[in-house]
Amino acid sequence: MNNPAAFNLQVSIGAETLFTLFGFNVTNGLLTGLVGTIIAIVILVYTAVSVKRGTYNRFIGLVQWVFEGLLRQINDIIPDKKLAKKMTPLAITIFFVVMFNYWLSVLPGLDSIRVNGIPVLRSSAADLNFTLALAIITVVTVQMYAVRYLGVFGNIKRYIRNPFKDPVGAFEGALEIIGEFSRGVALALRLFGNSFAGEILLIVILLLTSYVASIVLPFFMLFELFIGFIQAYVFFVLTLIFTSLAVTHEAPTHDEKKKQTA
């Protein structure tokens, strides 16, 4: 039986710098993220062009089926059709970019290409900078649409209320402020934790199974591909839910109705 301690397994939680370009550190996570993003763009553009030309095959049908399923989810979660249409490009792009970047961590040999002992490619989904950037984009977009639909002061009222006139509302506003930060952190950490854990799992399984790795590893790789799809879908759905909650108007109270009538 192999001794796990003899493997000398070293894992880096952060992305590692490959080279510096004009004072900017280019990391392996950034490089892989660019590759994953390019793959997503190429596939979506290829599918769109093929559909316009009337060219179909199984791959195009699969991508179109996924796209239409995501579109139905957007229309179901966001009741405002105009807002749903505006959110479609961002939400669907996030889904495909996250999924392909997660799947890159499952590819065998991704960690084997090294320069000065540093792997050239590393899944950007396992880089906290990438997941945190996606979470910030999501939170900022939600706030932009909240301001557009509720107005600047209407959006502020979701968080700040007069504690003397409406103590319960003031408490709810404080919780909402905490909730905004916790949503962003949860979005980033959920994706990062799952992707990083998946990479470690595959490496450990590869080392432990040794000669039978070619038989055992494909089952775990398929499982990680499924997890990648689920994580991308969860990120996609939460983006829509946060947007829908932010632009939802509260029903006016009895006093407010009397004022409006007067």
Image (tube, grey):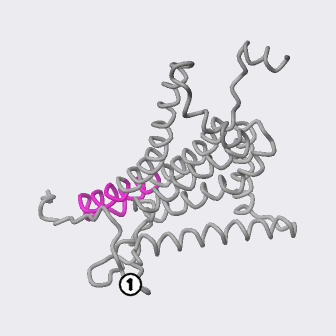
* Crowd rating for badge 1 (residues with CA inside 10 Å; few <14, some 14–19, many 20+): few
The quadrant the C terminus occupies is top right
- Residue sitting nearer the eye, 173 or 153: 153
Furthest residue in direction bottom, as rendered: 22
Quadrant in the rendering for residue 17: bottom left
Where is residue 224 drawn, in percent x and y?
44, 53
Number of numbered discs overlaid on the protein picture: 1
Q: What segment carries the magenta color?
A: 198-223
Residue visible at 42% across and 70% down? Answer: 29
Quarter of image, res 40: bottom right
Q: Which quadrant would the N terminus be assigned to in this image?
A: bottom left
Q: Nearer the viewer, residue 92 or 63?
A: 92
Is residue 97 shown in magenta?
Answer: no
Residue 7, given in percent of the width and then of the height, sits at: 17, 65
Q: Is residue 256 above or below residue 54?
A: above
Q: Residue beneath label 1, please?
A: 20
* Horizontal side of residue 127 vs 145, given as left or right: left
Position of 78 with respect to 194 (left or right) is right
Q: What residue do we see at 15% from left, 59% from top?
A: 2
Q: Is residue 115 above or below residue 258?
A: below
Task: Identify the secondary structure beneath mark 1.
Answer: strand
Q: Amino acid at mark 1?
A: Thr
Residue 248 percent across, percent down from the top left:
69, 33
